Amino acid sequence: MSAIAVPATHRSWRPDFWTLVAVGAWAILIVLLLLPLGLVLVSSFRDESGGLTLANWQRLFTSTRYVNAFINTLIVGFGGLTGALLLGSVMAFCMARIRIAGGRFVSMLAILALVSPPFIGAYSWIVLFGSGGIVRQTLMSWGIFMPPIYGVWGILIVFAFKFYPYVYLLTSGALANVNRSLEEAAENLGLTPFQRVLKISFPLVLPALSAGGLLALIHAIADFGTPRLLGRGFNVLATEAYTAYSAEIGSNLGMATTLSLALILMSMVFVFIQRFMSRKNVYHSNLINRPEKVRLRGFANVAAHVAVYFIALGGAMPAIIAAIYSVRKTNGPVFQPGFGLDSYRRIIATLGDVVQNSLLFSGASVLLIVVIGTLIGCLVARRNTAQTSLLDATLMVPYVMPGIVVGVAFIAAFNTPPLVMTGTAAIIILSVFIRRLPYAVRSSAAALRQVGPSMEEAAISLGYSPVQAFLRVTIPLILPGIIAGAMLSFVTAVNELSSSLVLYVGGTITMPVKIYIAINDGDYGTAASLSTILLVLSAGAIYLAFRLLGRDERALL
Amino acid sequence: MAYLTVDGAIKRYGTTTALNGVSFSVAKGEFFTLLGPSGCGKTTLLRSIAGFSQLTDGRVDLAGHDLLSVPPHKRDIGMVFQDYAIFPHLTVAENVAFGLKARKVAAAEIRERVAEALATVRLTALAERLPAALSGGQQQRIGIARAMVVKPRLLLMDEPLSNLDAKLRLDLRDEIRAIQREIGIAAIYVTHDQEEALAISDRICVMDHGCVEQIGTPQQIYGQPETRFVASFVGTMNLLAPGAFGLAQVPGVAQWALRPERLRLAEAGARARDGAGGAENGAASIAGTVEHFSYLGREAHLTVQAQGHRLVAQIGAPPPDLAIEAGRQISLSFDPADLHAFDAQGRRVPAERAA
């Protein structure tokens, strides 16, 4: 029963407010999502002169280079998934069920790992474990040989530490919510502790585990920075798509779009497999008894603490390294012994516009995301029709679109009339907007479903029109959720690299893009200090969100 | 004098019919209750009057004017919700003032009327609190004050007490009735609790499957149920087949019914003490085996198995030493004048025809 759907009379049809929202939502999705995607599809069947061809797809399946990239993408995807599941579930179990000293600090480190700016992660691993890495050099000087971190194993290690928070945050939430009585009942029925975990706890957290794993998998196959920096010849679909697009000589949009489509299809297959797997496994239980955290003793206690801190510090290490390196003395791009604020001075002197761009673009896209996302969220939550279900389903598409793909698709769509936006700030703002919009829609719809329609009905019965009732009752009630969502969107927007990398021009360069360029140029001081600024901005936004929403790390996913 | 009239209300959702031609009228100042099991259409009807749901067909008039063409926020109808629907971001006083602000009432008058309304529901001390910390009973009091303070033309209440515990339900029930009388407003009250309906209403409309079963005063509904559904939904009814216990086989009567409190315990020997009362007073008697006995203090319930029937007898003010063990043979008696008769369609057969 909808509180909003109350056309007053049986008069001739006049579009009401929510019908206009629906029309607007579809217009946005068609222009910013379906049209670019359609053009990507078309362009993958075009050759350089514009004729119809299957050559791109043929090359994808025959050229050794692309077949390798395809296989490599699967390797890093499942390798990253395995690593993230391993680290994430160990961490989740320890944090949810065992008393860990400094637990809050540990979960803060997990958040730090989650919001580390892209690229700086891989760079920090090189600083420590690369050919000339500090740790590697030290070990070598002690006579212990350690291979440098480059290559597929390096990528997998970085992915495991980078993506474990997805598994950890979702699974620990689920583990903390398994009704203790269930486990006690199992114990009472004669199951051993191991059987109990296997037969009761594991099936109950499986949906969360698989959802976290899916996030890790999708991010791993979409990740562009890590293989680019650590791969040393190990190519994946994301790097190939970027190379095909950005090659100075023989830039090949058709090949870039074909590779992008392959990447989308791969993500979609995984999403469907995960959906299929956890289709029946959603359990609702009324929570009476939260499980209690056990205090371990002796060796087991030490082992649990070592495991938790090893994972947490490993994941947060890139952010920590960046913060340390940002205050090292530099002379131009070269680090000097000692500490100083040279890098920050250089940023203020020469890169003010980059910081300003980042703030401006993120601010603008967050504003769009909040206003439009909230309206669509209300529509989806309150009007349950075939049309809104289709809208909801269409909004799933950006979930499986890697940033590189969004960038390439926007180039394909907005480089030629009628709508030319390439090289403008608008195209970067809109690309971030469309990628993050689904999250805002989901969160505002969820917030609204909690409010329930009778609040609005009460206001209407007291004499407020439906629009007034919405503004005066519903909006104030979901406002904290909206602002918290905005803060989290800001974190993603300000850290966005891969689509901006495709879309930026000299005047619209953002901090993550500048970090990428600085690392490629060997200007590590600038990269580290820019990363630190990003981290501080992200941390501030997350702090605000948690103040408003209550501390809930899962909101970050 | 009809103040609100509902005429031929029909509501269909796809192929299901929630309301199947409901008509009734409510007088000014009357407390009118829609009573029925869940899914009988009572809430749908209430929401249609409020304007939150649209009738497929039918008319609703309030004070002589068509109501359905008025948008819900202009109907000037107060509503009290089952889940309270108290705005959690506003204080108690702000909640109550909410409707007055929509009516652009002057600030000084708002203060005055809010204070008065809060005094009526005994919440003056909590005026500046946020509702989150208040109990369900207090929240529903806010809901009542909020709906009443605007002096609406009609007050609708959708199971307002069903989320409260038993003791509170009784207290608030009486309070609602007292406030409604004091203001003299016409009220439509929805409930599935028959005892609540009997206690609070001027008239009751019993509904089932989207149809009106009977409209009448509590006494008529309980004492003269027009259908077998009303008879068994309101209170408890023992259903007896014609021919059993020496009951007459009257043409057109498919079932006899008897309230548990009309069955008297007439143990062996008791009849002699009463002076062989039964036959002389025209009483009929039933011999049976006790299946279950429960002592509830002010009354006791006795389940008796007799001739394939399972009968419930209610013993008022049972002596404290009364205990009847299962398996005991006992005899029950009743006055045939207390019997209700129903035909094969479940409709009441008038006493003169059933005699």
Image: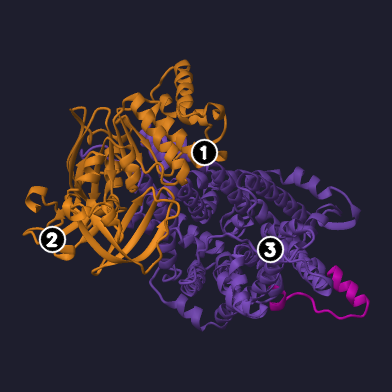
Chain colours: A purple, B orange
Q: Chain of mark 2?
A: B
Assess disc 2: are there few (<14), some (14-19) or many (≥20) residues with their C-alpha within 10 Å of its C-alpha.
some
Q: Residue at x 8, y 48 (%)?
A: B352
- Which residue corresponds to mark 1? B88
Comparing marks 1 and 3, which lies closer to the viewer? 3
Chain under disc 3: A
Residue type for callout 1 = Pro
Q: Nearer the viewer, mark 2 or mark 3?
A: 2
Q: Quadrant of the C terminus of chain A?
A: bottom right
Badge 2 is on which residue? B254
Is A154 covered by the magenta stretch? Answer: yes
Which residue is depicted at the point 46% across and 54% down? A414
Circle 1 or circle 2, nearest the eye: 2
Q: Position of residue A154 (x, y in %)?
A: 72, 74
Give the percent coordinates (x, y) of residue A346: 79, 47
Closest to the observer, B68 or B179: B179
Specify start and end residues of the magenta stretch as a single range.
A133-155
Q: Label 3's element? A: loop
Between residues A156 and B81, which one lies in front from this camera angle? B81
Examine the image and state in which quarter residue A303 appears: bottom right
Q: Position of residue B3 (x, y in %)?
A: 21, 29
Query: Is A278 rendered above or below residue B201?
Result: below
The residue indicated by pointer 3 is A292
Along the line of sight, which residue is nearer the eye, A34 or A257? A34
- The amino acid marked with disc number 3 is Glu
Q: To which chain does the residue with label 1 belong?
A: B
